[in-house]
Amino acid sequence: MINTEHHLEKKILRKFLINRRNHLSRDYEEKNMSHVHLRPLLNNINSDYVGSYIDYNSELSTNALHKYLIEKNLNICLPKIDYQTNEINFFKYSTGTKLVKNKYNILEPEITNEIIFPKLVLVPLLAFNERGFRLGYGGGFYDKYFSFQEEKEIIKVGLGFSFQNVYKIPIEGHDQKLDWILTESYLYKAI
């Protein structure tokens, strides 16, 4: 059952945060050192795959992160939405991978031979709080993915700008908590 008060709150907050990000992202992107701040987490993963995504619109750029991961001989996998099930799965990505736009105009891998199960996943967001909850775009794809993968102990890292930190986020029962927050200027463990 949908909590209409939370649904409306999230809708208003999303609109505000997209406008705010569109306005501020260029200045903050110039200071993007997220690839440097990610290093400590990479030392502790027991997998050679990191789940990431191709940034969209004014999101924090993932380009430097991807370049760094490739330099460290870590493999990258990207999500692709299955519209039949409304779920995402991750597929291998390299610099030669052909990408196609999905119905939201977000780039995804075209070829989906083998599903990959990464141990660390970078998660896009519109907002986050210190407790590790995020506000996404409303599709629920990542929350659903993480709820199905609970036994796999995935390290969930929210990726966004430091100005996307908000005091309070409307939380619903299906919302999955992040383990870490990574921005252009810091990495911290969610409390």
Image (tube, rainbow, N blue to C red):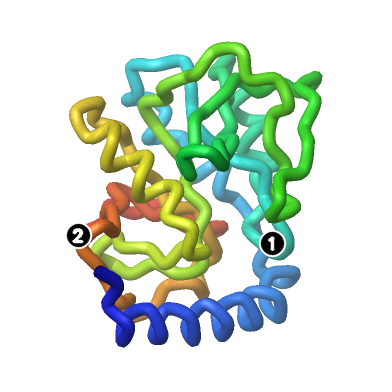
The residue that label 1 is drawn on is: 29
Q: Quadrant of the N terminus?
A: bottom left
Asked if 119 appears above or below 101 in the picture, the reply is: above
Residues under labels 2 and 1: Cα distance?
26 Å
Q: Quadrant of the C terminus?
A: bottom left
In which quadrant of the rendered view does residue 153 lie?
top left
| Relative side of 186 to 150, left or right | right
Residue depicted at x 37% and y 34%: 41
In which quadrant of the rendered view does residue 170 lie?
bottom left
Asked if 109 appears above or below 172 in the picture, the reply is: above
In which quadrant of the rendered view does residue 146 lie?
top left
The answer to whether one can see residue 95 in this image is yes
Give x and y (percent) for residue 60.
63, 57
Amino acid at pointer 2: Ile
Residue depicted at x 52% and y 77%: 14
Crowd class of label 2 (few under 14; some 14 to 19; many from 20; radius 10 Å):
few
Give x and y (percent) for residue 93.
66, 23
Instruction: Assign a secondary structure to mark 1.
Output: helix
Report the front residue among 111 and 159. Answer: 111
Asked if 151 appears above or below 156 in the picture, the reply is: above
